[in-house]
Image: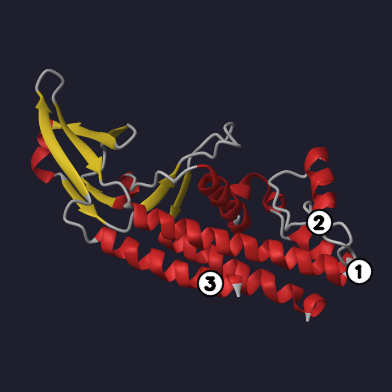
C-alpha cells in the first residue's frame, strides 16, 4: 500500500516537472562583451522549482521509505521477534564498524536469509559509486526532506550549449559561460529536461557534493524498490 501510494506521488511529481520544463522562463540568459579580455559572457539564471514540485517529491520519498521500514517490521515479526524503535530497513554507504553495529540493531530477529538479502542490497556494495545506488539516493532525499524543503533547481546540464569550448563559473542560482568574442553570433542555449539539485541534509553536513538527480533517476528509485527489492521478501511476509 505504501509503495502504491508512493507511485501516485511520483506521477504527480513527474507531471509537475514536465510542466516546469515547458515554462517560457525556465532560464534567462543575458550576454555582454568583455572587450578588454576579448570574451563574450553569458550569465544564465535558473528558475527555481515550485513548492508543489518539492512537496510532491517529499510525499513520494516518505511513502517509499516508510514502506521499506514497514517491511522491516514485518520481517522482524516473521522471525519471531518483537520489533521496536530500532527496527527499520537499514541503508548504509559504508560497511565500517559503526555502520555494522547499527545494521545489526536494525535487523535484529529478522530471518537469516532476509538479512543476507538486505546486506546484498546495501549501497556500500557499489564501493566508490555508492551515491549512484537508488537506496542511497532515497535515503539522502529523505534526510533532506525531514529537515527542510529541498532547494531544488535546474543546473547547467539543462542545456544544449553551442559552440563548444566555453568556460563556466557556477554560482548558487546562476552560472556564467564565456567564449571568444568571435563566437558571439554562434552561441545557442536550448533548454532540456533539467537535473534537480538538492542541498545537503543537516544531519550529514560533511557530504562533499549536492545531490543531483533527473526525473528519470527519481523514477528509477521507485522501480528499484518495487521490482528489485520488494519481491525478494514476499516469501517471508505472506
In whole angstroms, how far apart are the C-alphas of marks 2 and 1?
A: 13 Å
Say left or right for 2 vs 32: right
List the residue tagged with mark 1: 80
Quadrant the C terminus occupies: bottom right
In whole angstroms, how far apart are the C-alphas of marks 3 and 2?
A: 24 Å
Circle 3/circle 2 CB separation < 8 Å: no
Q: Residue at x 32, y 58 (%)?
A: 193
In the image, which is nearer the foreground, mark 2 or mark 1?
2
Secondary element type, mark 3? helix
Secondary element type, mark 1? loop
In whole angstroms, how far apart are the C-alphas of marks 1 and 3?
A: 28 Å
Circle 2/circle 1 CB separation < 8 Å: no
Which quadrant of the figure has residue 1? bottom right
Secondary element type, mark 2? loop
Q: Residue 135, how many percent across, how many down?
A: 62, 57
List the residue tagged with mark 2: 84
Amino acid at each position: 500500500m505504501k509503495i502504491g501510494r508512493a507511485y501516485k506521488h511520483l506521477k504527480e511529481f513527474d507531471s509537475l516537472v514536465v510542466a516546469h520544463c515547458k515554462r517560457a522562463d525556465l532560464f534567462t540568459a543575458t550576454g555582454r562583451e568583455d572587450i578588454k579580455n576579448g570574451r563574450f559572457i553569458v550569465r544564465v539564471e535558473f528558475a527555481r522549482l515550485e513548492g508543489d514540485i518539492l512537496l510532491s517529491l517529499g510525499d513520494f520519498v516518505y511513502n517509499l521509505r516508510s514502506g521499506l521500514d514497514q517491511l522491516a517490521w514485518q520481517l522482524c515479526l516473521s522471525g519471531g521477534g518483537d520489533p521496536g524503535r530500532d527496527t527499520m530497513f537499514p541503508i548504509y554507504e559504508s560497511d565500517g564498524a559503526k555502520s555494522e553495529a547499527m545494521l545489526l540493531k536494525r535487523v535484529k530477529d529478522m530471518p537469516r536469509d532476509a538479512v543476507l538479502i538486505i546486506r546484498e542490497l546495501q549501497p556500500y556494495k557499489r564501493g566508490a559509486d555508492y551515491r549512484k545506488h537508488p537506496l542511497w539516493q532515497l535515503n539522502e532525499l529523505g534526510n533532506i526532506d525531514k529537515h527542510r524543503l529541498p532547494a531544488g533547481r535546474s543546473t547547467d546540464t539543462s542545456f544544449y550549449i553551442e559552440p563548444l569550448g566555453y568556460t563556466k563559473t557556477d554560482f548558487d542560482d546562476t552560472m556564467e559561460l564565456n567564449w571568444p568574442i568571435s563566437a558571439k553570433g554562434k552561441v545557442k542555449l536550448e533548454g532540456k529536461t533539467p537535473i534537480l539539485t538538492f542541498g545537503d541534509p543537516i544531519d550529514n553536513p560533511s557530504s562533499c557534493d549536492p545531490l543531483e538527480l533527473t526525473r528519470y533517476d527519481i523514477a528509477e528509485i521507485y522501480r528499484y524498490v518495487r521490482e528489485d527489492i520488494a519481491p525478494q521478501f514476499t516469501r517471508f511476509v505472506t
